[in-house]
Image: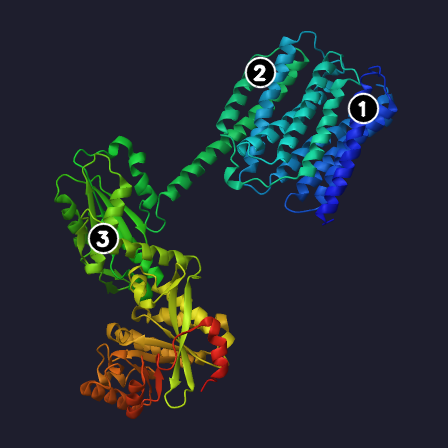
Amino acid sequence: MRNETTALLLMRLTFAIAVPLALIFASALFWRTPDVYLPWIDGVAYTGVILLGALTVVPRALLGGPLGTGWALLATGMILYASGEVWWALVGRTRSEAEAVGLPLEDVLWLAFYPVQVLALWRLMGKVPRRDRNLLDALVVSGGLLVVLAVLIQDWLPGANASGGEDSLIVEGLYVTGDLVLVVLAILLVYVQRFDVAPGWWLIAAGFLAFALADILYWILSSYDAYVEGTWLDLGWLVSALCLAGAAILGLETMHAPQVQSLRGIVPASLAVMVSGLALGWGPEGPFGDFARYAALATLVLSLLRLNVAIRDAAEAQEQRRRAFTDDLTGLPNRHALHALPELSGKSLASPTGWSLIVLGLDRFGDVNASLSHERGDRLLTMTAERLGGCLLPGDVLARLEGDEFAVLMRLSDPSQGFAGAERLQAALEKPFEIDGVPVPLTACMGLSATLDPVPAIGPLLKEANLAMHYAKREGPGLIRAYSGQEAPSSVQRLRMRASLRSDLKAGGAAFELHYQPIVRIDNGALLAMEALVRWRQDGALVPPGQFLGEIEHAGLMVPLTQLVLNRAVAAIHRLGQGHAVTVNVSPDLVTPWLLDQVRDTLDRSGAPPHSLIVEVTEDALIRKPDTANEVLRALRVLGVRVLLDDFGAGWCGLSAVRDLAVDGLKIDRAFVARIHRDRPTRAITASIVDLGRSLGLTVIGEGVEDAGEREELEALGVEWVQGYAYNKPIPEADLAAYLSQHPPT
């Protein structure tokens, strides 16, 4: 049954039949003679209410879902109890004591109700953490209450006896035990949700409470031979069935995991141990006293188990707290620990002379990850932490904030000590690190902030030191700057931009858009490739790359941005084109084996052929790491990916070196193209670049062509391919398919 409307209709119809039967039973209490069995009232009406209550729950179980098993168990428990009532009405009530052998079947069915209902509550809780603790708490609390109840009945209510013998008393006690477990567990579930639960949970708690009260009163009255059938007490079990049926009609919301917490196990367990110990060491005589001792022994065992769980929970909480305040890589305190330091350390952190806080950011650490691998980069961070920690003074605190940023909190004895501490840290980094036999030089920019307060306010100090560190980063590597007391608007704007860029990239990069500018043949407009150009959308407007790529570089975000552009551009050209190619610009710092792996991964993921991708690199990549760059570029060409040398002439790359470059073409820098028809030396240099490229069999492209004059000069020099506003502005991806359909690939 999957139609919720039909299921709800059936539940309401069944419930509507059960309610009048319950009213009939209740009205009979006014005119019937107690202790006289009335088949239509005690048999049909009474048992019918319980059976119909169970049948009301069945459609909810058949709907399935995460709580379906719980509802099925709830209905099963109610059916077991109703079956016990039917068997007692047909057989049990007329059975003589001589015929009774062992535990009667009706007691077996009634007692089976309890474990099934406990399992039902267990399942209805949903898959929430620590629900086993909730059940164990309920067992412990129930045991303690049972001990107290047994002692009170024997000690405060003289004349109580076990008319059916001690075995009968124990059976009756099992009923009460089951009732207490159900009630405590239901109430506990409401409590751990801070009483913010759906009405269905309140009905379940009320149903089990009504059931338990009726059972406890029955237990007490039976012990005095005072229970009479057909009284108001019998309504308790009917109210319970109607409450559980009503909960099924209303349904339950799954419990919210963040709110589901076990009671502090030490409290119920300790109280249960106390009352159980009293019952064992001092307890009244008689059958109830004996029962109290049995219950006390069981409760002690459960209490010891719960205490053990509580100790393990405390140890686990301590470990979680340690992890929350510790950097996994270096083992140093993290940003959270630094902020919490004044609270955690208390008076031991006080310094009458004040404090200084230094924020240290490694320079160009992204290069290390890109060239040496992230694994070696992590090792370098660990080695850096060890070296910085070795130069601290007693009382100094070193923490790793994130990435390549560290912070050091120092006691300040005089105004110059802050700079002295920063210089000490700087000196510790002067000697190059060695990773797998390769020396790795490392510098860091540092920002310094100070306060004369005895207990430091970490938040403001950290903000000021971080700003000062970014001032130092803008001026150059290895610098130390102190916070000046002012936040430059431009600096704040840059920091906010970097935060937004980082957030947008982590969120999947939806704020970044690709536009495509064609590279075409100068004479007939035939298409060579589309260059992917990234834009960043902020507040509904597109931010050009010149305004944010620098911040991407400084924030160490070039790797995820390059991955984003590569994946999107190759996927788009393969999906929308007909054998077209796309060019993607790659930062010089990323022309490492990482690039080769990333290109392979991109092509595999998209299913695009290698010739559909052209990688553009600048001369800087060849100047910084010529051997590595050439090796990577050769590997790309072997793979089938073409390579263009972008902005040729803007950097420094000897013309003789071009002969050995693993590239397929050159793009003449815009600075030459813009002056080619106005400046004779520029035209002569451009001509030599074109001749060199043609003699080496390279594709030569003039980029940034904006007017007819520039186009004509390039054509006169023999340039075959051009790119620029004179031909096409960058095209949004939404218009890419239409453009490609009109311009087949060459």
Q: Looking at this rendering, what residue extends furthest in the top direction?
A: 158
Residue 507 as seen in the image, left or right of residue 110:
left
- Residue that badge 2 annotates: 279
- First along the sequence among labels 1 and 3: 1
- Residue that badge 1 annotates: 25
Whether 268 is drawn above or below 161: the answer is below
What's the colour scheme?
Answer: rainbow
Asked if the residue at tag 2 contacts the one at tag 1, i.e. Cβ–Cβ closer than 8 Å, the answer is: no
Q: Which amino acid is tagged 1?
A: Phe
Please identify the quadrant where the C terminus is shown: bottom left
Which one is nearer the viewer's eye here, 196 or 706? Answer: 706
- Mark 1 Cα shell of 10 Å, populated few (<14), some (14-19), many (≥20): many
Whether 287 is drawn above or below 25: the answer is above
| Residue 685, numbered label | none
Tag 2 secondary structure? helix
Q: Which amino acid is tagged 2?
A: Ala
- Residue that badge 3 annotates: 488
Q: Looking at this rendering, what residue extends furthest in the front direction?
A: 708
- Point out residue 154 in the picture as x, y percentages from the top left corner: 65, 11
Res 174 quadrant in image: top right
Q: Which amino acid is tagged 3?
A: Ala
Q: Mark 1, mark 3: which one is toward the viewer? A: 3
- Point out residue 160 in the picture as x, y percentages from the top left corner: 70, 10
Which one is nearer the viewer's eye here, 619 or 106? Answer: 619
